[in-house]
Amino acid sequence: DQQVKQNSPSLSVQEGRISILNCDYTNSMFDYFLWYKKYPAEGPTFLISISSIKDKNEDGRFTVFLNKSAKHLSLHIVPSQPGDSAVYFCAAARNEGAQKLVFGQGTRLTINP
Amino acid sequence: DAGITQSPRHKVTETGTPVTLRCHQTENHRYMYWYRQDPGHGLRLIHYSYGVKDTDKGEVSDGYSVSRSKTEDFLLTLESATSSQTSVYFCATSATDTQYFGPGTRLTVL
């Protein structure tokens, strides 16, 4: 049972345009959500997070939107840059001390010059 | 980012042999985690620790054990490795909300 789903395995975007990565979850008990970026042969790197008490969080070029009623979150990257090419994972957890993150399958983002 | 190292970075072993992976952190974070990454599954939690000698199971704990005798070290042991445990293993640590990951260990079980 996949509690966190990223339905797009890959996404290709032109440099300078907006990249939108999507994530859906099924467990209504999740109250904390994170996005990680991963380059080959490296560990995931934290990008941005959002608590369920908010519907938007922004950090530079990265904005995460949370729609609790739809159990959906998205990551917007504006403008997209070649260095953004990587695999992006969304993750969810119940904020209760030790965070047992549940990850989506990942979306490979390719930024084309 | 937290100072997290994993050793070894690569390992090839044979079915039935014991294997221990080490995670070391320098940030004094309370929580430590072990995940495995497999194609089509993202990362899945194996075990985690919420303090020295305090550990608990994650989503895919069968065939794995862990130990944490010091704040900075978290060991993952495969008592008798199987081919299904071929994977990339990531350690993570956290103080509060955000987990930070190590560089990973690629384990191949032949």
Image (cartoon, coloured by chain):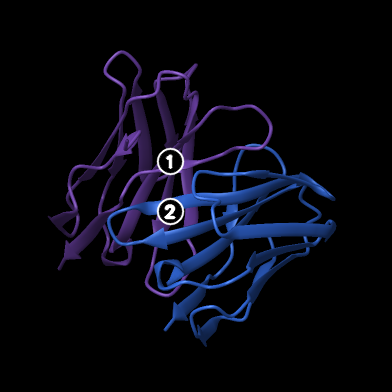
Chain colours: A purple, B blue
Is residue B81 placed above or below B66 in the rendered structure?
A: below
**C-alpha separation, residue under disc 2 versus residue under disc 1:** 9 Å
Label 2: which secondary element = strand
Q: Depth-wise, is mark 2 or mark 1 nearer the camera?
A: 2
The reply to whether residue A101 is in sight is: yes
Is residue A15 placed above or below A70 in the rendered structure?
A: below
Hey, what amino acid is under mark 2?
A: Leu
Residue depicted at 76% across the width and 50% down the height:
B29
Q: Position of residue B65 (x, y in %)?
A: 66, 58
Q: Which residue is mark 2?
A: B43
Residue A3: mark in rendering: none
Label 1: which secondary element = strand
Tell me the quarter of the picture where residue B91 sits. Answer: bottom right
Quarter occupied by the C terminus of chain B: bottom left
Residue at the outermost top position: A69
Q: Position of residue B101 (x, y in %)?
A: 57, 59
Q: Which residue is mark 1?
A: A91
Give the chain letter at badge 1: A
Quarter occupied by the N terminus of chain B: bottom right
Label 1 Cα neighbours within 10 Å, binned few <14 / some 14-19 / many ≥20:
many
Hey, what amino acid is under mark 1?
A: Ala
Q: Are marks 2 and 1 in contact (CB under 8 Å)?
A: yes
Tell me the quarter of the picture where residue A39 sits. Answer: bottom left
Give the chain letter at badge 2: B
Residue depicted at 69% across the width and 32% down the height:
A97
Label 2 Cα neighbours within 10 Å, binned few <14 / some 14-19 / many ≥20:
many
Q: Nearer the viewer, residue B8 or A89?
A: B8
Q: Is residue A26 left or right of residue A30?
A: left
Q: Is residue A105 left or right of residue B81?
A: left
